[in-house]
Image (cartoon, helix red, strand yellow):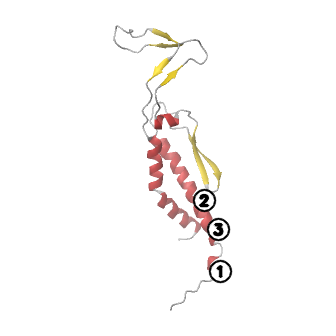
């Protein structure tokens, strides 16, 4: 039966290199996620696209966050909801162009609340995450090369 001999010196530093590979892979995936979210987020005035940042939790975990409080709603959507005024007694806005028997364009409307029909999400977070998953092997390969394991 053939014998396999492993020289312990060849394994010196191996656990640390594996750890560094995982750490570097996480860093690469995190930066990819930030970039993908910025690319996939719908563009209106650019606030959402510029709102993504990475937060390092520890060597092996990161969190991608958005400073736009509506980021999840744009991606996932929302059920119908009511809008109430924050600092006034009524909501005031110009009525958009519509049927003449309702309002004419430019008329001011004063309401205590508005029934919003909800928002259909566009799924940009899932698209961005899927793109990161598709490149995971690439991040690991790059990290393995950087730490000298391949």
Q: Residue 99 vs residue 125: left or right?
A: left
**At 34% across and 7% down in the image, what residue appears?**
101
- The label on residue 32 is none
Q: Position of residue 127 (x, y in %)?
A: 44, 45
Where does label 2 land, which residue? Answer: 23
- In the picture, residue 117 is in which quadrant? top left
Q: Position of residue 107 (x, y in %)?
A: 43, 8
**At 49% across and 42% down in the image, what residue appears?**
38
Q: Residues within 10 Å of mark 3 (few under 14, many from 20)?
A: few
Q: State the residue in front, 110 or 144.
A: 110
Q: Is residue 4 visible?
A: yes
Where does label 1 land, which residue? Answer: 9
- Looking at the image, is mark 1 or mark 2 earlier in the sequence? 1
Separation of residues labelled 1 and 3 (CA atoms): 14 Å
Separation of residues labelled 1 and 2 (CA atoms): 24 Å
Q: Is residue 11 above or below residue 27?
A: below
Where does label 3 land, which residue? Answer: 16
**At 64% across and 68% down in the image, what residue appears?**
16
């Amino acid at each position: 039966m053939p014998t396999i001999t492993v020289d312990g010196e060849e394994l010196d530093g191996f656990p640390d290199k594996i750890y560094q590979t995982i750490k570097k892979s996480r860093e690469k995936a995190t930066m990819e996620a930030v970039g993908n979210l910025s690319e996939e987020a719908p563009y209106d005035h650019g606030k959402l696209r510029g709102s993504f940042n990475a937060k390092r939790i520890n060597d092996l975990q990161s969190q991608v966050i958005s400073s736009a409080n509506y980021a999840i709603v744009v991606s996932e959507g929302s059920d119908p909801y009511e809008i109430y005024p924050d600092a006034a007694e009524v909501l005031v806005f110009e009525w958009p162009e519509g049927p003449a028997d309702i309002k004419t364009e430019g008329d001011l409307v004063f309401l205590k609340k508005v029934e919003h029909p909800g928002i259909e999400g566009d799924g940009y977070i899932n698209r961005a995450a899927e793109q990161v998953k598709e490149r995971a092997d690439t991040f690991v390969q790059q990290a393995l090369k950087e730490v000298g394991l391949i």
